[in-house]
Image (cartoon, rainbow, N blue to C red):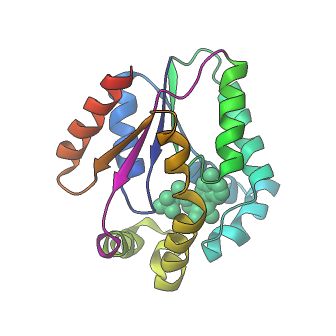
Amino acid sequence: MINIVIFGPPGAGKGTQSEKILEKFGLVHISTGDLFRANIKGETSLGLKAKSFMDKGELVPDSVTIDMLRDKVEENPKAQGFIFDGFPRTTPQADALDTLLKSLNTSISACLSLQVPEEELIARLLNRGKTSGRSDDADETVIKNRLAVYMRETSPLKEFYRSQNKLEEIHGVGTIDEIFGRLSDAVEKHA
Ligand code: ADP
């Protein structure tokens, strides 16, 4: 199995690049942000719980997020591998992911970390907010909070993967295909 974590701040291009990577390497895409949005749309109790956090740009609590992720992985017993997009975002989530994959006799192959300057991220998110219908992209205060939460809670995970020789830092500015080329090379190195 190839199991990839696609990592980076909000607006780094994780979703866009995940679509291209899963196509090339035959992976199942799990985006916790997409799963939460689908639950909000379907007005489930999980969606209701997640919405109040997402609207403020805060993280949804670990227990809720980890249970949802585990269910999704277990729904795909025949997967040749996964691409995790927007997960893990905290140390307990990273530990839970390792434990889950271990129980399936597999592990994370690589963490691909997209690096994009902050001004570029804010511009991309505000631009996406014009068409995505995502209220968390339309409000600059919420965007700044998401970036602050990323710096405080999520970016330390780079060390978690670096210490296991799994971290690949990828320059995330350029055309979609240029960035995809850099990511593909990194996946092949760890496949
Ligand atoms: P982006 O990376 O552009 O912020 P996502 O769709 O990945 O977009 O996430 C949107 C929101 O969903 C986050 O701001 C957060 O509130 C919630 N969320 C997504 N994934 C997680 C996670 N792994 N843990 C906690 N909250 C999450």
135 over 100 or under it: above or below: below
| Nearer to us in this view, 58 or 43 | 58
162 over 129 or under it: above or below: above
118 in the magenta segment: yes
Give the tally of numbered discs: 0
Q: Position of residue 190 (x, y in %)?
A: 38, 24
Q: Residue at x 66, y 36 (%)?
A: 97
**Does any portion of residue 165 appear in the rendered image?**
yes
Q: Is residue 42 left or right of residue 15?
A: right
Q: Which residues are magenta?
A: 105-120
Q: Residue at x 60, y 53 (%)?
A: 89
Q: Is residue 75 left or right of residue 184?
A: right
Ligand 1, by image quadrant, is bottom right
Q: Is residue 114 left or right of residue 135?
A: left
Q: Residue at x 35, y 51 (%)?
A: 114
Q: Position of residue 126 (x, y in %)?
A: 38, 76
Q: Position of residue 138 (x, y in %)?
A: 46, 78
Q: Residue at x 49, y 79 (%)?
A: 144
Q: Position of residue 111 (x, y in %)?
A: 45, 39
Quadrant of the image for the C terminus?
top left
